[in-house]
Image (cartoon, rainbow, N blue to C red):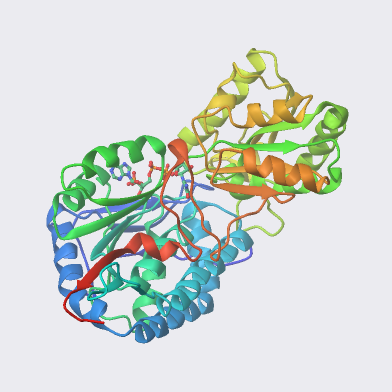
């Protein structure tokens, strides 16, 4: 193993104090690579959620009223501290989430980049003075912080999905309550400790960990002081939150599930396309919302791609993410392994050919962990589960196609619309296809598309709202128009 392992027992952060849950309830956090308990965290009650909303609400006026420059400085300092602690936070992430340590440290860097990016955006929340229709009037447009915001985040990117919300919220002048996934609360706490140590005032960021996500969301959605909720997670829960938001017409951002197509045209750079496919599909053991879930390959290069992909996937080392050289860590839990296997067995039963993988891995030191072999399936069709549902595991299913028109139709044949990828060396085709894919994010000749400076988000059942980029801060701001009459000419 590359690093020593230490247990962490965390607390809630409410109004600048690290506290236990009222009543003292706690729950354990498990290492998906070994089944061992690596720490624990408080199981917050409804009283704790209300206390966090009180704290965020109390801190709002001061934070919203501070200069954008002073908020930007604190965001930059937070980014620096998160980066300085990349080793420690990365280790916590590998222990509770499972991804290989270099990938975990990379995510910590990615998480810091949101704080840094939005420090810049904080200083550029410009308004407008609009030429009036009535010459006696003046028309001012100002952008202001929405108010208290809540962030509900998933376990697959426990650091970055949080700062992607906290960065713009803090920059805009909002105060926040964060509810991380119950599988990965320790990374969230470590990130918030860095933000606190940067000198962010008490109550600007608050942490609630709980096993009762439904209770937490009822409290957040039921309190009129919470004006904004940003959620990253499954489409199923996202739909529930849309219903909950109706009562108080809450402002919502939803980053939901995906089912990314990855199209390889026969004029592509084949070696690069295979490498990019592996980067897209197998990062985080296939547990990303933007990972390729349907691979379409033009018939002229289909066999060649199946073979090369099979050979390269065979070399991916599976194991505990703390071991050097491991590319594929465990899946988050046993249900995730069951789901990957169900998709594979269903595809095989319906006529797909197993090129490699297709089984749980339990031998040697993989015993006790949630490991699934990196898998390639040849001949996937639209009757198979893998073609419709998010697999969220290390399984690549390939389907041949003949024409560009067909590839676009296949790619768009889903209720999701988050990310889509394609490879071609024909630049006219590149523009044509990018325009016609019904997705929020397109990777053209690349499999890695996430970055703080780009707007990230989906269409259709992948949600609404954008995170990152110049527009990311808009989710935390309202636009106010002031009409000043009687000014004269
Ligand atoms: P999930 O089950 O929807 O959980 C996401 C978060 O919501 C967790 O904090 C969870 O808490 C909480 N939650 C669960 N039920 C809730 C409820 N009834 N009300 C309020 N909150 C609730 O999703 P997941 O399994 O953690 O994450 C995987 C999913 O996230 C995939 O579908 C993936 O595509 C999607 N995702 C999307 C993006 C994107 O940017 N579009 C990025 C990453 C992941 P508990 O953990 O305590 O249950």
Q: Residue at x 47, y 41 (%)?
A: 459
Residue 217 at x, y = what percent?
23, 48
* In the depicted structure, whether residue 90 falls above or below residue 377: below
Q: Is residue 60 left or right of residue 277?
A: left
Where on the picture, by quarter, is residue 20?
Answer: bottom left
- Find residue 32 and report its horizontal and vertical position in percent: 50, 47
Pick the front one: 166 or 469: 469
Judged left or right of residue 142, residue 468 is right
Left or right? Give the position of 31 relative to 71.
right
* Quadrant of the rendered image containing residue 151: bottom left
- Which quadrant of the frame does ligand 1 lie within? top left
Q: Is residue 339 visible?
A: yes
Residue at (40% x, 37% y) in the render: 235
On the picture, is 307 further left or further right than 483?
right
* Residue in the picture at 83% in, 42% down: 268
Rendered image quadrant of residue 356: top right
Is 26 situated above or below 346? below
Identified at 41% across, 40% down, the residue is: 234
Residue 182 visible in rendering: no
Q: 236 and 314: which one is in front? A: 236
Q: Position of residue 219 (x, y in %)?
A: 16, 50
For the image shown, how many numbered marks are present on the structure?
0
* Outermost top residue: 350
Q: Give the position of the N terminus as an image quadrant.
A: bottom right
Q: Quadrant of the C terminus?
A: bottom left
Q: Could you tell me residue 237's position as x and y percent?
A: 34, 38
Which is more toward the observer, 365 or 254? 254
């Amino acid at each position: 193993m590359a690093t020593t392992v230490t247990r962490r027992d965390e607390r809630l952060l409410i109004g600048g104090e690290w506290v236990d849950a009222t009543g003292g309830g706690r729950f354990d956090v498990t290492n998906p690579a070994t089944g061992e308990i690596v720490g624990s965290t408080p199981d917050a009650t409804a009283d704790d959620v209300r206390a966090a909303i009180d704290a965020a609400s109390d801190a709002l006026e001061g934070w919203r009223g501070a200069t954008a420059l002073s908020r930007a400085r604190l965001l930059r300092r937070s980014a620096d501290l998160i980066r300085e602690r990349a080793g420690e936070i990365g280790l916590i992430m590998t222990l509770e989430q499972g991804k290989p340590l270099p990938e975990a440290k990379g995510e910590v860097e990615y998480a810091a980049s949101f704080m840094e990016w939005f420090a810049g955006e904080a200083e550029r929340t410009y308004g407008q003075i609009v030429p009036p229709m009535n010459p006696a009037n003046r028309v001012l447009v100002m952008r202001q912080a929405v108010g208290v915001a809540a962030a509900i985040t998933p376990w697959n990117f426990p650091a970055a999905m949080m700062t992607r919300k906290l960065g713009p919220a803090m920059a805009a002048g909002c105060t926040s309550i964060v509810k991380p996934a119950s599988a990965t609360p320790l990374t969230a706490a470590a990130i918030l400790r860095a933000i606190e140590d940067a000198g962010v005032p008490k109550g600007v960021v608050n942490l609630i960990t709980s096993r009762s996500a439904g209770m937490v969301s009822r409290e957040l959605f039921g309190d009129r002081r919470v004006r904004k909720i940003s959620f990253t997670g499954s489409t199923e829960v996202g739909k529930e939150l849309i219903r909950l938001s109706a009562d108080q017409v809450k402002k919502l951002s939803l980053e939901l599930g995906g089912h990314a197509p990855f199209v390889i045209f026969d004029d592509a750079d084949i070696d690069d396309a295979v490498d990019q496919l592996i980067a897209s599909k197998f990062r985080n053991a296939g547990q990303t919302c933007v990972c390729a879930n349907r691979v379409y390959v033009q018939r002229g290069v289909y066999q060649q791609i199946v073979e090369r992909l099979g050979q390269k996937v065979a070399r991916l080392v599976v194991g505990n993410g703390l071991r050097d050289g491991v590319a594929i860590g465990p899946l988050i839990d046993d249900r995730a392994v069951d789901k990957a296997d169900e998709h594979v067995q269903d595809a095989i039963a319906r006529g797909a050919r197993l090129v490699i993988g297709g089984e749980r891995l339990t031998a040697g030191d993989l015993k006790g962990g949630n490991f699934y072999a990196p898998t390639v399936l040849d001949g996937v069709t639209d009757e198979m589960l893998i073609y419709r549902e998010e697999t969220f595991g290390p399984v690549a299913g390939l389907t041949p196609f003949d024409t560009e028109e067909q590839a676009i139709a296949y790619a768009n044949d889903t209720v999701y619309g988050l990310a889509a990828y394609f490879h071609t060396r024909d630049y006219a085709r590149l523009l044509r296809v990018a325009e016609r894919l019904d997705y929020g994010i397109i990777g053209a000749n690349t499999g890695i598309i996430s970055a703080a400076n780009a707007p990230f988000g989906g269409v259709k059942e992948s949600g609404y709202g954008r995170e990152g980029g110049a527009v990311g801060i808009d989710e935390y701001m309202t636009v106010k128009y002031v009409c000043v009459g009687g000014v004269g000419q």
